[in-house]
Amino acid sequence: MTELQLRAALCEVGRRLWQKGLVGGNEGNMSCRLSPRQLLVTPSGVSKGHLNPDDLVITDLKGQPVREGQSVSSEVRLHVACYAARPDCQAVVHAHPPVATAFSLAAETIPDNLLPESAVILGSVATVPFVMPGTDEITGEITPLLPDHKTFILSHHGAATLGKDIYDAYARMETLERVATVIMHAGNIGKIRPMPDRAFDHLLEVALNGRLD
């Protein structure tokens, strides 16, 4: 995509996140690779449902704006850590999906052997221990998990998903919340049963777990 197309795509994904209730207020942030040395990042203090293309900020690979007077969320550290560890990652979405986040409050994981889309789209969902939002602590906690995961629950905070482009990262976030919701409803109905082992093993082969291609 061109820079103009990437700006439009980030704004569109922001609207989808807001309309789906995956973020509220000025919550959440998104980014994508603009070039080998630059990122395109959402600004701080702006509703993701009401972004304009000109609102988006170009930063270096450390998350520092290249133009004076612009600011990004302090949570850009999360994005920087993802790009540093995953050369295949082209986009990152951080949102606050209610049900998926609730799993972390209850100290529950989201298994990948219950629904096909869990294995194929989400892969193994990693839970990142709680850190103070917007601090360098996130780098130390998420970096060891990045080589083998593309979907993350941020304990007591929200979620983050990686993608081969911004739409891929968004789709993974939407699927995460839907999977979490189905699991919650199933638990209210009765005992949850995993998929047969043969089906799960096949799906893992199809998914090439941990990769974004």
Image (cartoon, rainbow, N blue to C red):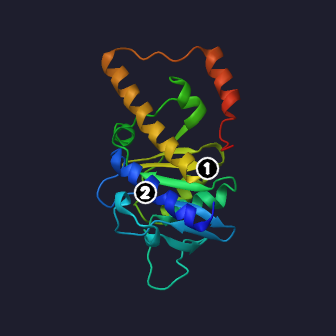
In the picture of the structure, the residue carrying the numbered disc 1 is: 146
For residue 60, above or below residue 130: below
Look at label 1 and name its amino acid: Leu
Q: Nearer the viewer, mark 2 or mark 1?
A: 1
Location of residue 213 in the rendering, given as x and y in whole percent from the top left corner = 69, 43
How far across and down, in percent of the image, does residue 59 sit? 56, 73
In the rendered structure, find residue 131 and report the number of the disc placed on it: 2
Q: Residue at x 41, y 38 (%)?
A: 177
Q: Quadrant of the N terminus?
A: bottom right
Decide: is 78 above or below 67.
above
164 is higher (above) or lower (below) than 46: above
Q: CA distance from mark 2 to mark 1?
A: 16 Å
- Pick whichever, 32 or 201, lies toward us: 32
Tell me, yes or no, if residue 124 can be seen here: no
* Residue 91 % position (x, y): 58, 55
Q: Is residue 16 left or right of residue 115?
A: left
The residue most toward the bottom is 68
Q: Quadrant of residue 70?
A: bottom left
